[in-house]
Image: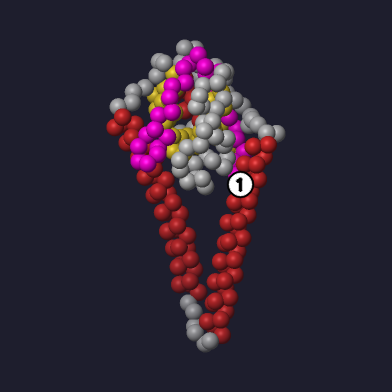
Amino acid sequence: MTKPAGTQTGISDPAEKTRRRNARSLVAVHALAFIALMLGFLLRVNYVEKEGVHLDWMALLIAAAGTVVLIVGLALIVASRRRAAGWRGVAEAGISGATVIGYSSRIESPPFLTQEVPGPRGRGLEVAITADSEGIHVRALLRGGLTDFGLIPWSRIKMIGPATKSVGVGLQLKSGVLHIDLNEPTPPYANQLEFFPTRGTATDAASLLTQYGPRSSQPTD
């Protein structure tokens, strides 16, 4: 049940190809936007200099670097607050057993549910995967609270383990994704679930969850 998934799956799947195409398109749009921003900035600087205004290039470089640091810092703060909210929701709900906080990417992974869930379409969902003697629950952080999508009994879990995933424009992440395969339909869950753990590796996450399984074993890379 717990042998590692090994290599990435679904490469020839049309949905997987669509997700990769969307990821490449997103990177291309961001690159073009950055190039356009830089060209506009350089043209503006050139215009100002032609008007006889002396510019301090060191100050401009510091300002540009500060802007980048500010944007990245804000993104990290937002992500950290979301993860903290996930742990807080688990604690407030009094959930026992093993818990893995993860991320379900709308672009890089197939949906883990057979139905649409609320949330920004350009971003994924923060999830809490919890395991006990009965099975696994997946809870998503929605509207500031945890929404439980129901139990997956151990009898319906075929495999839990780390898998190699091609992320974004093709960057390989060894054991970067926690892969859960089901051996029979378990509504509202899809037959394959993929999550990116936000703390530790996918191997660690799989080991933590499967310690409650009926035939638990230590997954390896």
User: Which of 197/24 is in front?
Assistant: 24
In the image, what residue occupies the spot 35% across and 37% down?
A: 145
User: Which of 134/207 is in front?
Assistant: 134
In the image, what residue occupies the spot 50% across and 14% down?
A: 155
Query: Disc 1 marks which residue?
Result: 23
Q: Is residue 216 visible?
A: no
Outermost residue, right direction? 12
In the image, what residue occupies the spot 30% across and 27% down?
A: 94
Q: Is residue 161 magenta?
A: yes
Q: Is residue 212 magenta?
A: no
Q: Is residue 95 above or below residue 22?
A: above
* Coordinates of residue 5 in the picture (x, y in percent): 59, 25
The N terminus lies in which quarter of the figure?
A: top right
Report the amino acid beneath label 1.
Ala
* Coordinates of residue 208 in the picture (x, y in percent): 44, 24
Outermost residue, bottom direction? 52
Q: Is residue 152 above or below residue 44?
A: above
Asked if residue 84 lies left or right of residue 20, the reply is left
Snapshot quadrant of residue 47: bottom right
Q: Is residue 53 visible?
A: yes
Give the structural element (helix, strand or loop) at label 1. Answer: helix
Tag 1: Cα neighbours inside 10 Å, few (<14), some, or many (≥20)? Answer: some
* Coordinates of residue 128 in the picture (x, y in percent): 41, 32
The C terminus lies in which quarter of the figure?
A: top right
Magenta span: chief secondary structure: strand
Model colouring: secondary structure
In the image, what residue occupies the spot 47% across and 12% down?
A: 214
Asked if residue 108 lies left or right of residue 73, the reply is right
Q: Which residues are magenta?
A: 140-168
Question: For the image shown, how many numbered marks are present on the structure?
Answer: 1
